[in-house]
Amino acid sequence: MSGGRGAPRRAVLAAGAAGAAALAAGCSKYGDEGAEPQPSQPPAPSVTAPTGTAPTSKAPPGERPPAGPELAKTSEIPVGGGKVVKDRKVVVTQPESGTFKAFSAVCTHEGCTVAEVADGTINCPCHGSRYRVADASVAGGPAPRPLSEEKITVTGNSITLG
């Protein structure tokens, strides 16, 4: 009688295996039918060139890469102050006459865009974080770290990214 019991058990196991295969196929994304699942990979780390390092480009040796979009005219940036370029999320400062710097305009506290440069600081309206115009170090508020520096080029009266 053991032969009679084995057959239904095999049928149940076969049906279970077929059901599992159908379930797995039903869980695939539309358009992925028959595709092997790809292992998930962590996002690539972002790399920021240290200050003073030449940017990498595809320009031939000895040629400068094309300048990025203009952020401001040098005449628009007051000494000891700066200008927030909201559409580029960059703030340009002039800590000393003729010295221009640029930093991310994204506050390191909670990601708000800084709103103004006044009284020697870059100011975030969300929670009161303030950064120094000279180096974007934290001057006050809840910001945990300085704003990141951006690479700029000053040519004549034009300040451009890159």
Image (cartoon, rainbow, N blue to C red):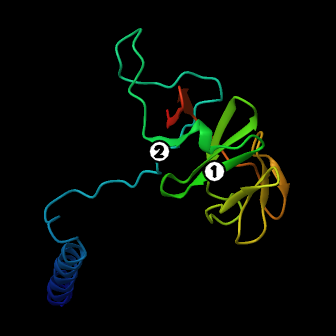
Q: Quadrant of residue 133?
A: top right
Q: Residue at x 20, y 89 (%)?
A: 5
Residue 108, x across and y down, in percent: 69, 57
Given contact means CB atoms under 8 Å apart, are the residues at marks 2 and 1 in contact?
A: no
Residue corresponding to mark 2: 44
Q: Quadrant of residue 1?
A: bottom left
Relative height, residue 59 to residue 96 (above, below): above
Relative height, residue 137 to residue 128 (above, below): above
Q: What amino acid is at disc 2?
A: Ala
Q: 4 or 62, which is in the foreground?
A: 62
Q: First in sequence: mark 2 or mark 1?
A: 2
Q: Residues within 10 Å of mark 2 (few under 14, many from 20)?
A: few
The extreme top residue here reads: 62
Relative height, residue 76 to residue 123 (above, below): above
Measured Cα–Cα span from mark 2 to mark 1 = 32 Å
Residue corresponding to mark 1: 83
The extreme front residue here reads: 75
Secondary structure of residue under mark 2: loop
Q: Residue at x 66, y 34 (%)?
A: 100
Residue 35, x across and y down, in percent: 17, 58
Residue 148, x across and y down, in percent: 66, 44
Q: Residues within 10 Å of mark 1 (few under 14, many from 20)?
A: many
The extreme right residue here reads: 140
Secondary structure of residue under mark 1: strand
Q: 80 or 64, which is in the foreground?
A: 80
Residue 65, x across and y down, in percent: 40, 23
Q: What amino acid is at disc 1?
A: Lys
**73 relative to 115 in the view: left or right:** left
Residue 67, numbered circle:
none
